[in-house]
Amino acid sequence: MSLGGRLQDIAGTPWRPVSGAALGGVAVFALLCAWMAHTGERWVHLLDGANLLFHEAGHPFFGLLFGADFTVYGGTLGQLVFPVVAAVSFWLRREAASFAVALVWFSENLWNIARYAADARAQALPLVGGGEHDWTEILSRWGLLEHDGGVAAVIRFAGWLGVIASLTWLVHRWQDAR
């Protein structure tokens, strides 16, 4: 069977029902991520520790894959790839609550990326290994360094949209299961 045929089969497969407990658990997870990402240290400890690992691993991985000029993008891509892979895996298995958690994780990463982008000119955030600031380089390449705050605002807004869309979609799945 072709990939297109397999995807059509999956798309026609119903989602597993969402329980009220699953909906509540995902909502609590999303709210905790939002609160922790926007207050105090602005760090969701366990999740952001993993995100940092994926970010740092992304630099050499994408640099080797696409060339040295692409290394700077690898960190951001690395931290986004893992939640996307998780989301695709749960989508293929039609596990709605797990899919929504992966989307919230992706969105929470966008908040971190926004914080990093907003710091492009100030460079006040501590960097692993004290290296170069990715988003200073990225925004300089794009001619947008003086707009680091605006770029960050757009990325942060996308993160909020992702969380709201994930929860709204999951509520819809929960209502369908009732």
Image: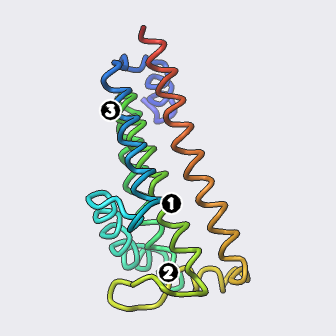
Q: Amino acid at mark 2?
A: Val
Q: CA distance from mark 1 to mark 2?
A: 19 Å
The residue that mark 1 highlights is 111
Give me the residue at 34% from left, 83% from top. Answer: 128
The residue that mark 2 highlights is 72
Give me the residue at 36% from left, 46% from top. Answer: 86
Quick check: 144 above or below 18?
Answer: below
Mark 1, Cα crowd under 10 Å, few <14 / some 14-19 / many 20+, is: many
Give me the residue at 35% from left, 75% from top. Answer: 56
The residue that mark 3 highlights is 25
- Residue at the top extreme, as displayed: 178
User: Which quarter of the rendered picture does the C terminus lie within?
Assistant: top left
SS under mark 1:
helix
Mark 3, Cα crowd under 10 Å, few <14 / some 14-19 / many 20+, is: some
In front: mark 1 or mark 2? 1
User: Which quarter of the rendered picture does the N terminus lie within?
Assistant: top left
Mark 2, Cα crowd under 10 Å, few <14 / some 14-19 / many 20+, is: many
Quick check: 113 above or below 15?
Answer: below
Mark 2 vs 3, N-terminal side: 3
Q: Amino acid at mark 1?
A: Trp
Give me the residue at 40% from left, 77% from top. Answer: 59
SS under mark 3:
helix
